[in-house]
Image (cartoon, rainbow, N blue to C red):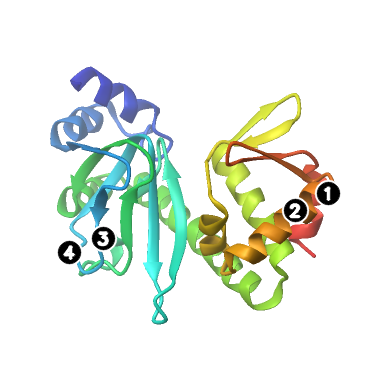
Amino acid sequence: MRRNKAWYFRNNPVISALPEAEIDWLEGRVEVISLRRKQPLWQVGEDADRVYFVRSGIVKVSRVTEEGRELTLGFFTKDDLIGEGAVFTPGPREEAAEAYDDTTLYALTRDDFVALIRRNADLGLRLARLVAKRNQRLERRVGDLLFKTAHARLASLFMDLTDDFGVRDSRGVIVNLKLTHREMASLIGATRETVSFAILDLRKDGLIQTESKRVIILDEQALQDLAHA
């Protein structure tokens, strides 16, 4: 496991540029956490005292609205850093995180991660860029909820998922993440029925294909145009 940790950190895009001595320090400080599907990583109200690197699997982060509806904030997979809010706003978590699939993570305490950032200014810059990118995506989703149709919101979701989970094959781009219509609805702020009808329309128009709960993007440009409509 020690060799696996070192290999992981040397190849992780967030921290791969760290000096070798810092990689050695890091692999000695992280805790390995293994979760089964649906097992919580953290719950609302828990102290935000750790950050996590996803070694394998998928983590779902969500929040429940005042009306009791679940809003999925995102899915995170191999090499992703999650729980980074602990660095900037320590205190109770406002969202929940659970394993969407069997998942292995490396956990680092907030204090250790902050110390690492203070010793390595470039890591702080990378973290700031990561947070800014995620905030931009969330802000765009809020704008989509207010101003775009369900079809456009769904197209935008598929394009985002393509960035994170896309695998190209002869047909197009496979979104390698199995989602039910209800889960898609929680990502775009719609009902399950609305998502089902929108998917039928996108299939009829030749933009996507569905297969075993996976979406295959057949026409990226047309889907991108719809997302920006």
* Residue type beneath disc 2: Leu
Query: Could you tell me how far apart the alpha carbons at marks 4 and 1 are, in whole angstroms?
Result: 47 Å
Give the residue drawn at x 75%, y 44%: 208
Return the residue at label 2: 200
Taking depth in this image into account, of 114 and 191 the one nearest to the observer is: 191
Q: Is residue 83 visible?
A: no
Q: Nearer the viewer, mark 1 or mark 3?
A: 1
Return the residue at label 3: 86
Return the residue at label 4: 47
Return the residue at label 1: 204
Q: Residues within 10 Å of mark 4 (few under 14, many from 20)?
A: some
Left or right of 215? Residue 60 is left
Q: Earlier in the sequence, mark 1 or mark 3?
A: 3
- View extreme (front): residue: 193
Q: Residues within 10 Å of mark 1 (few under 14, many from 20)?
A: few
Q: Is residue 106 visible?
A: yes
* Residue type beneath disc 1: Lys
Q: Residue 167: where, in percent of width, then height?
A: 62, 31
Q: Residues within 10 Å of mark 2 (few under 14, many from 20)?
A: some
Left or right of 13? Residue 150 is right
* Residue type beneath disc 3: Ala
